[in-house]
C-alpha cells in the first residue's frame, strides 16, 4: 500500500500552492519546483549560518563547514556510495561530465581510443566528448535504440573493444523517459575493461540509486531537477579514478602548498572543488535529499508513471498526435521495485499539423507549462525523424487535473490551428 499522496505533497510546494488555480506545471524534467523545506533551509543558512567554509578559525565558519560536509555524507548515502570523499560538488550535471572528460583527457584518452555514447544523450553528454575528440582525435560511437527506447545491447557488444575507454549514457532519457538496462551494460563494460559513466540527471528525481550495485565508475546528477536549488550538482566517482584524474580548476582549497615555483595538490574531494563553492546550494541539496527520502519513493515513481500513462492514453484520441514513449501496457509499466522500473512517466509528443512551439505557446495561455523543441537532444530528434517535440514531465506534485488541463488546451489549439 502506497503512502504517497500528491494532494498532500502539493501543500509542500509554495509555487504549486500559489498558482494551483491557474497553472499546470508539467516541465519538471527541465527543473523541478522546490518544497518549502528546501527553501527554508537555505533561508536559515543565509540568515543565521553563513560564513565561508574550510578556512575560518571561528565557530560560525566551522558550523558552515560542518553543514557543507554533512551534505556530502548525505549525498553519499543517497547514492549508496561507500565513501563521502568520492562525492564531488559541481555546478551541475553538465560541469560534472566536463570534469570527467577533462580528467580522462590527460592520460586515459588518445587518438587510438574510442568513446561510446548513445543517440539519446543530452547535449551535456555529447558536446564535451566531441570537443575532446576534435582535440585528441579519438573516435566517438553513438549507440542506436531498440523499439523500447533503450540502447541496443547487441550493437554495444559489437562496438566494445580494447580501444574503448569509456561508455557514457543517460540513466534515464530526458525525452523518452526510458530507463537503461544499466546492469547489463555495466557487465559488458567490466568485461571490456572500460569506464562506465551514467548521467543521472533524469534518474535521481525518480529512482533510488545504488552506484555500487549499478556497477558504474562515475555517476553525475543535478540538484535542481530533484527539488533542490540550481547551480549545484554532483560527480560521484570511484576513489581510484578520482585520485588518478588531475584537478579541473586551479585556485584556493584544492592545493596543499603553493610557492612561486609551483603547487602541490590536496586530496579528493577538495582537489576538485577550487574556490568558494555554492555553500547554500549544497546545503539546499541536502534538504532536498532529506525531503525526497521522507516520501514513499516507490509510490512517488508509480504516481509519475500513472500520470504519464493517463496522458499517453488521452493523447491517443488525437489522430494527428504521435507519442514518443513506451507502448507497453499500464500494468507492465507500474512497478513493485525500482529494479523493475522501465520508465519514469515522461511523455514527448508531436503534432503532425501544428508546430511544437506554437502548441507550447498556446498551451501557456491555458496555464500549461510544457517544454517544446529538441530538449537539448538534437541527435535523438534526428534519429526519431522529427525536428521538435513537446514534452510533459509529471512529477510528485502533479495530478490528473494538470493532465486534463493540457488535454483541454490541445483540443482548443486544434480548433484554432486546424480551423
Ligand atoms: N543530462 C540530462 C539527461 C539532462 O536532462 C540534463 C538537463 O536537462 C542535463 C544532463 C544537464 O543538466 P544541467 O543543465 O543541470 O547541468
Image: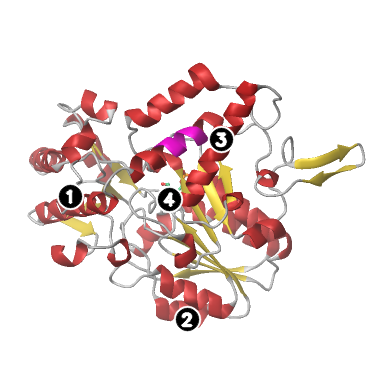
Q: Residues in magenta?
A: 282-287
Q: Is residue 388 magenta?
A: no
Q: Residues within 10 Å of mark 1 (few under 14, many from 20)?
A: many
Please say if the residues under marks 1 and 4 sit with CB atoms less than 8 Å apart.
no
| Distance between the alpha carbons at the discs numbered 2 and 1 | 35 Å
Rendered image: mark on residue 397: none
Q: Earlier in the sequence, mark 1 or mark 3?
A: 3
Label 1 belongs to which residue?
307
Of 365 and 342, which appears nearest the observer? 342
Rendered image: mark on residue 68: 3
Helix, strand or loop for disc 1: helix
For the point 26% across and 40% down, the residue is 370
- The image shows residue 353, relative to residue 24, as above or below, that is below
Q: Quadrant of the N terminus?
A: bottom left
Q: Is residue 240 left or right of residue 128?
A: right
Q: Is residue 97 left or right of residue 182?
A: right
Closer to viewer: mark 3 or mark 4: 3
Residue found farthest to the right? 261
The total of numbered circles placed on residues is 4
Q: Is residue 286 magenta?
A: yes
Q: Earlier in the sequence, mark 3 or mark 2?
A: 3
Residue found farthest to the top? 47
Q: Residues within 10 Å of mark 2 (few under 14, many from 20)?
A: few
- The image shows residue 146, relative to residue 414, as above or below, that is below
For the point 31% across and 61% down, the residue is 338
Q: Earlier in the sequence, mark 2 or mark 1?
A: 2
Q: Earlier in the sequence, mark 3 or mark 4?
A: 3
Closer to viewer: mark 2 or mark 1: 1
Q: Is residue 95 left or right of residue 20?
A: right
Label 2 belongs to which residue?
157
| Distance between the alpha carbons at the discs numbered 3 and 4 | 21 Å
Image position, residue 380 (x, y; %): 38, 60
Amino acid at each position: 500500500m502506497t503512502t504517497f499522496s500528491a494532494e498532500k505533497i502539493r501543500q509542500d510546494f509554495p509555487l504549486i500552492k500559489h498558482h494551483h488555480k491557474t497553472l499546470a506545471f508539467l516541465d519538471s524534467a527541465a527543473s523541478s519546483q522546490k518544497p518549502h523545506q528546501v527553501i527554508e533551509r537555505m533561508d536559515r543558512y543565509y540568515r543565521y549560518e553563513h560564513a565561508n567554509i574550510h578556512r575560518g578559525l571561528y565557530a560560525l565558519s566551522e558550523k558552515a563547514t560542518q553543514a557543507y560536509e554533512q551534505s556530502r555524507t548525505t549525498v553519499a548515502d543517497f547514492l549508496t556510495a561507500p565513501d563521502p570523499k568520492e562525492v564531488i560538488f559541481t555546478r551541475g550535471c553538465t560541469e560534472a561530465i566536463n570534469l570527467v572528460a577533462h580528467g580522462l583527457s590527460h592520460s586515459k584518452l588518445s587518438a587510438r581510443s574510442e568513446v561510446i555514447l548513445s543517440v539519446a544523450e543530452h547535449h551535456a553528454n555529447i558536446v564535451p566528448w566531441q570537443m575532446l575528440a576534435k582535440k585528441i582525435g579519438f573516435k566517438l560511437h553513438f549507440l542506436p535504440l531498440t523499439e523500447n527506447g533503450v540502447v541496443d545491447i547487441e550493437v554495444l557488444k559489437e562496438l566494445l573493444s580494447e580501444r574503448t575507454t569509456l561508455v557514457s549514457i543517460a540513466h534515464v532519457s530526458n525525452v523518452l523517459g526510458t530507463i537503461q538496462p544499466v546492469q547489463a551494460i555495466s557487465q559488458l563494460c567490466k568485461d571490456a575493461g572500460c569506464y562506465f559513466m551514467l548521467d543521472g540527471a533524469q534518474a535521481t528525481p525518480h529512482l533510488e540509486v545504488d552506484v555500487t550495485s549499478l556497477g558504474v565508475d562515475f555517476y553525475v546528477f543535478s540538484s535542481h531537477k530533484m527539488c533542490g536549488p540550481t547551480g549545484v550538482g554532483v560527480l560521484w566517482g570511484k576513489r581510484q579514478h578520482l585520485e588518478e584524474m588531475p584537478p579541473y580548476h586551479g585556485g584556493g582549497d584544492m592545493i596543499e602548498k603553493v610557492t612561486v615555483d609551483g603547487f602541490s595538490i590536496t586530496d579528493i574531494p577538495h582537489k576538485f572543488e577550487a574556490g568558494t563553492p555554492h555553500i547554500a546550494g549544497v546545503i539546499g541539496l541536502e534538504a532536498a535529499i532529506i525531503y525526497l527520502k521522507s516520501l514513499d519513493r516507490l509510490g512517488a515513481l508509480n504516481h509519475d508513471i500513472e500520470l504519464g500513462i493517463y496522458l499517453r492514453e488521452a493523447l491517443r484520441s488525437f489522430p494527428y498526435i504521435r507519442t514518443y514513449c513506451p507502448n507497453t501496457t499500464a500494468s507492465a509499466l507500474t512497478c513493485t521495485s525500482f529494479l523493475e522500473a522501465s520508465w519514469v512517466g515522461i511523455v514527448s509528443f508531436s503534432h503532425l499539423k501544428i508546430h511544437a512551439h506554437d502548441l507550447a505557446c498556446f498551451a501557456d495561455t491555458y496555464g500549461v507549462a510544457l517544454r517544446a523543441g529538441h530538449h537539448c537532444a538534437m541527435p535523438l530528434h534526428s534519429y526519431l525523424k522529427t525536428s521538435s517535440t513537446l514534452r510533459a514531465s509529471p512529477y510528485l506534485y502533479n495530478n490528473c487535473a494538470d493532465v486534463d488541463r493540457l488535454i483541454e488546451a490541445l483540443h482548443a489549439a486544434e480548433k484554432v490551428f486546424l480551423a
